[in-house]
Image (cartoon, helix red, strand yellow):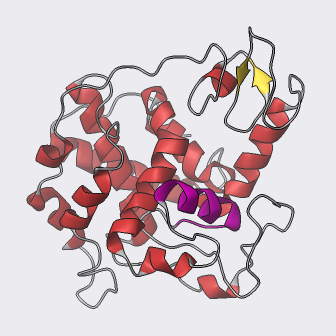
Amino acid sequence: MNTYGLLIITGLLLAGIPNSTAQNCGCSPDLCCSKSGFCGSDEQYCGVGCQEGPCFLPPPSNNVDVGSIVTDAFFNGIVDQSDAGCAGRGFYTRAAFIEALGSYDRFGRVGSEEDSRREIAAFFAHVTHETGHFCFIEEKNGASGDYCDETNTQYPCNPSKNYYGRGPIQLSWNFNYGPAGVSIRFDGLNNPEIVATDPVISFRTALWYWMDKAHSVIGQGFGATIEAINGPLECNGRNSDAVSSRVRYYTEYCNQLGVATGDKLRC
């Protein structure tokens, strides 16, 4: 769950230091400026989010219609497994997902049709695990936690707000609400509550996080997406039950969508 994205982001920043110049780059012509503002030449610099330099070109999109795969039957089949009294009932709808999807035209549309189906299955497996079959809009007992990284001066916390998990992938921390708001065009730092009150924005935050963190690694297997979403808390034996839950949902949805799971399911 992205509640613990601080560990992931810190690791990425530290990884960039040896070849870095300064924030906003100013790299030599043979180096890429990463999304974090550092210079380098491998995937983390020239891949997703590369700002300038010899950036790797993204693979072309295919012609898959994601909406024809995420049918009413598929979507409602997830929702119907939650308790009838859940807050997410009536909030999370296929219509809201499809509207949010319009902002992310590469989701489920890279590689072969089988690759697309695997990505869709992976996304909904994580969403199912995070929300209890679309039951929870907000993190249980989230208000009692501290989700402000005061060292992040780019996205400073509003002291009267709380950045606990909200939405399909439980967006958390000021350093996620801030850039998500910039990308999606809502005030993530001063109005984080909108992720739990506007279903389209809620789905957009989940898709934003997925495209930023997990989309580029789906080709490495489902386990790589677990690492991207909640690796520090679950992978390498830290929480095997949670990993098994995610894998179980992924396998179930791959079966429903008629595609093989592929290898490397665990992290």
Please state the extent of the stretch shown in magenta in the rendering.
171-184
Secondary structure of the magenta portion, mostly? helix
Residue 254, position in %: x, y? 24, 42
Left or right, 46 with reference to 97: right
Residue at point 11%, 61% (across, down):
72
Q: Is residue 177 magenta?
A: yes
Q: Is any part of residue 18 visible from this angle?
A: yes
In this rendering, is residue 44 above or below 29?
below
Could you tell me which residue is drawn at 20 percent across and 43 percent down? 66
Determine the residue located farthest toward the top in the rendered image: 30
Q: Describe residue 260's horizontal placement relative to residue 57 as left or right.
A: left
Report x, y in % for residue 87.
34, 86
Vertical arrangement, residue 181 with respect to residue 80, above or below: above
Q: Is residue 105 above or below residue 204?
A: above
Quadrant occupied by the C terminus: top right
196 with respect to 30 (left or right): left
